[in-house]
Image (tube, rainbow, N blue to C red):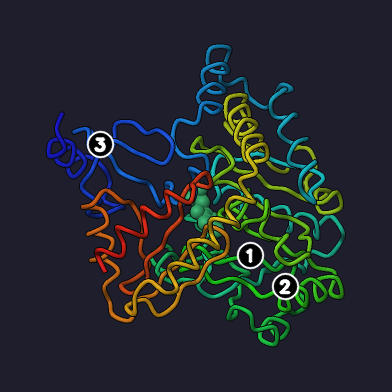
Amino acid sequence: MNLNEIIELDSKHFMNTFGARTPVCFEYGKGIHLYDIEGKMYTDFFAGIAVNALGHSHPAIVDAITKQASKFIHCSNLYYIKQQALLAKLLTDVSCADRIFFSNSGAEANEGALKLARAYFKKKGQPNKYSFICLEKSFHGRTITTATATGQEKYSKPFAPLTPGFKHVPINDFDALSKAVDENTCAILLEPVQGESGVHPLTKDYVTAVRKLCDEKGIFLIFDEVQTGLGRTGKLFGYQLFDVEPDIFTLAKALGAGFPIGAVCAKEEAAKGFEPGDHGTTFGGNPLACAVALASVTAILDEHLSENAANMGDYLASILLTLSDKIIEVRHVGLMFAIDFKEPIAVTVKQKLFEKGLLVGNVGTTTLRVLPPLIITKSDINYFICVLMEIL
Ligand SMILES: *Cc1c(COP(=O)(O)O)cnc(C)c1O
């Protein structure tokens, strides 16, 4: 089947949620490279939107999938699952969390975190504490409740009426946040670095003050680490950027290195919100997903990919800053990058990079978004810079 035939099938039979996609269909990948059905090679500086932390076809991931799939894939959560227990132990060993619940996606993990917070305060005899404060321009997912939490109307408006109990305040504005907290607030939900809306980091002072406020008011701090988790920011978890621990945080994207899995991670006290029967999932935490995530997290730790993300991020930023006067700002935390142009050329630049076999993303018309796999080297960055410089 050629590309045009695939595009025709897609346009006839797939729901039109993604619009006109980039006209390419990949056949296989290796490391930071993808190969399309005509054999053309691409260099992946977008990593499946921050998912492919280990690049493509990492031997440990291929091995984990093959081995587990040849044993069994699914058995339901009615039975004990060794891989799930081991993955929960590993995540609690390396993070501030004491207990984990596994989902299939980021949105589902965030739903779980919101449910956990509401359930906790109901059980504590404070049923009036049910509302959440979130940030403008945030992104938390596409279910009705996580779209409500998301601080961008375009994601929620078509699906009104939305879930009650959500307020939005501007990023890094502690006054606005503390004014928004009232007797109904149960938790504050934050991305350590806003990803989808163009790499907007929280400041350390802000997060420190928010943590203090949560402690004073007896409410939860929840971090959505779906994108920032597992090395992307140069730390294993985004909360480590601020030396502040959340009560609950969520993971997904890099957790399964491309295999769908998410996680709700909570401190012992917060985890008391869920009692048997309160929450569940059919697929979540199945042996295959957990075996893959075990391999993925182990590789991220063993290959020191958080450190690599920090070093490579600083290296890429140092070059980008002096690359061209068409670039007016570079925002980055580890390997989360937004490159702002003076003029609305982001789509054209993305398109030209694609023609030259480089995959990146954009936010609006002036910002390029770059999210390379965490395994990239200096020579990969030099190659990217060369091509980008030529285009600019
Ligand atoms: C991608 C993302 C989500 C949604 O994850 P899905 O797996 O697409 O449901 C939620 N929060 C953040 C911060 C994300 O980047």
Q: Quadrant of the C terminus?
A: bottom left
Is residue 78 something that shows in the picture?
yes
Query: The disc labelled 3 sits on which kind of residue?
Result: Asp
Q: In whole angstroms, how far apart are the C-alphas of marks 2 and 1?
A: 9 Å
Q: Secondary structure at mark 3?
A: strand
Question: Residue 166: which quarter of the image?
Answer: bottom right
The reply, left or right, for residue 25 in relation to residue 210 is left
* x then y, percent, for residue 316: 48, 61
Q: Does 177 sit left or right of 253 as displayed?
A: right
Q: Which mark is residue 192?
A: 1
Residue contact at pointers 2 and 1, CB within 8 angstroms: yes
**Location of residue 148 with respect to 384 vertically, above or below:** below
Picture layout, residue 246 above or below residue 86 = below
Tell me the distance, in whole angstroms, between the alpha carbons under discs 3 and 2: 43 Å
Give left or right: position of 49 versus 7: right
Given this view, does label 3 or label 1 mark the residue nearer the observer? Answer: 3
Q: For mark 3, what is the residue? A: 36
Residue at image location 13% in from the left, 35% down from the top: 5
Q: Give the residue type at disc 1.
A: Pro
Question: Where does label 2 land, which residue?
Answer: 207
User: Viewer-proximal residue, 148 or 73?
Assistant: 73
**From this viewpoint, is residue 145 visible?**
no
Q: Amino acid at mark 2?
A: Val
Q: Nearer the viewer, mark 3 or mark 2?
A: 3
Q: Quadrant of residue 291?
A: top right
Residue at 22% across, 59% down? 352
Res. 127 image quadrant? bottom right
The secondary structure type at the circle numbered 1 is loop
